[in-house]
Amino acid sequence: MEEMEHNNISNAQIVMGDVIGLVHIQDEKTETRDTCYSSDPKRINVTDCQSDLKTDIPWSVNIPSEAFNKSRLKNHGCALLGVLRFKNMGKDKTKNYTVLNNEVYGITMKANISNLSNNIEMLFTQKDLVGDASCSSWNGKGNLTWTTSGCKTVKVDKNTIKCSCSHLTFFAVLMSPPDVNPNIIAPYVESLSYITSIGCGISIFFQAVALFMHFLLRKAKSNQATKILINMFEALFLLNLSFLSNESIANTEDKAACVFIALLMHYSMLTTFTWFFIQALHMYLWLIRQNVTITNYMRKITVFGWMFPAPIVVAVVSLGGYKEVIIKATSGKTTRMCWITDPLIHYIMNIGYYILVFIFTTGIFITIFTKIVQSQRIKAPDGKRKTFRKQLMMVLSLFLLFGLTWAVAFFSYGPMLIPSYYIFTVLNSFQGFFLFLYYYHIHNDVAGHFSDDPESSNSTITIVQTRINAVENI
């Protein structure tokens, strides 16, 4: 570059064994514009950006003027560009992919060029492409480790792959073998996404209405059961909101933002599970134990409900578990999401945690249900029987909302795979709406039985305790 500047030369070819390249300098007097380059077996060439695509050119790139302007700002007025092609990258025997045409292209402007609004577009060509193509770039760390972050892949035709990237580094198209066991979920991705978006949107609306009415109209009259339910509303509202905004944030290709939204969605999901657990525990204490006295009860369970999941998400962040996930549909449409990419972390932190909560809530439900059914055998007036039915309906409804809907995923195998996915999607995306119905059509009828005020809860506790004691005495 020094020799070129001294001799006022704007372009120079590079040949170093299998490596060929081009160095290009634009002085501050030259008007910046989109510039295109292509490669043939022996050299990198400057080409006309308006010319038609030539199928015999293995690689070409369009670098926008925005990149040259950024280079000028960081290189004292001159725009500097280096393009290098490395051959014989071949197949990594430890990875299940090959590098298209055995070629890797490095593009540098002697400055950190990233987050371009007009992406760098590259065309990679090979006759009769076989396998799944993925536009990838070097992550800048250690050995040549590839990432798809910042690049989008479009298959133009059977011979051409288009890569659109927002940064400069080393680029290649990685070809994975065709999947011998194709993803049978792919044909249903779009419909499942559509159902989820509608369900989460409806849930957010009704959750917002419930929270608005609670904090403005009914907060002063709230008992412990209502406060616990409202915390569950807040956790589920945060989960739905983070899920709906996840794809938009993933599409920005901002790594920090992607990690944050994945962390927020994971935290809110674990918090929702935790409040399911607390709701079950509360029912057990009030319906079975009854005489338990806990100082600052609400304060303690509130801190526990919101703080217990925090160390889990911190651990996942420290392990680098939150990354971008690409979901492909049969139509070719790809959806970007930010979530946990390591299956081991997912099974331990999510499925393992949920199983513990599910086992506990199931045990509580069986215990309460058994006690109430046994107490029904004792003859009681009609009013007490109605109270029993309300209690039974409350327990059954809460058990369904404790996370039984999440358990549908356990049956996602064999012939039940697709039906269970649809059932799981509908039940969980509309879960906020179901909680709203519960709050206003069931909880209002029996909330008084779980009030902090002894006068409002004494009658129910007495009825239940009398029946349970009678059964135990028998």
Image (tube, rainbow, N blue to C red):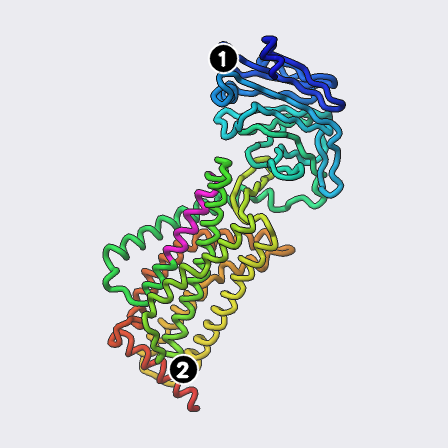
Disc 1 or disc 2, which is closer to the eye?
Answer: 1
Find numbered disc 2 in the image and state the secondary structure of the residue it sits on: helix
The secondary structure that dominates the magenta segment is helix
- Say few, some or many: other residues with alpha carbon within 10 Å of mark 2 (under 14 / 14 to 19 / 20 or more): many
Q: Horizontal and vertical percent for residue 82?
A: 61, 21
Q: Horizontal and vertical percent for residue 51?
A: 61, 13
Q: Quadrant of the N terminus?
A: top right
Residues in magenta? 233-248
Q: Amino acid at mark 2?
A: Ser
Which residue is label 2 attached to?
Answer: 375
Q: Amino acid at mark 1?
A: Glu
Whether residue 32 is in magenta: the answer is: no
Within the image, what quadrant is residue 186 found in?
A: top right
Within the image, what quadrant is residue 331 found in?
A: top right
Q: Is residue 25 above or below residue 439?
A: above
Q: Nearer the viewer, residue 118 or 155?
A: 118
Q: Is residue 276 visible?
A: yes
C-beta proximity under 8 Å, tags 1 and 2 = no
Which residue is label 1 attached to?
Answer: 28
Apparent side of residue 229 relative to residue 156 in the rendered image (left or right):
left
Find numbered disc 1 in the image and state the secondary structure of the residue it sits on: loop
Q: Horizontal and vertical percent for residue 356?
A: 52, 66
Q: Nearer the viewer, residue 413 or 175?
A: 175
Q: How many marks?
A: 2
Q: Is residue 380 above or below residue 76?
A: below
- Say few, some or many: other residues with alpha carbon within 10 Å of mark 1 (under 14 / 14 to 19 / 20 or more): few
Q: Nearer the viewer, residue 209 or 52?
A: 52
Residue sitting at x 44%, y 82%? 374
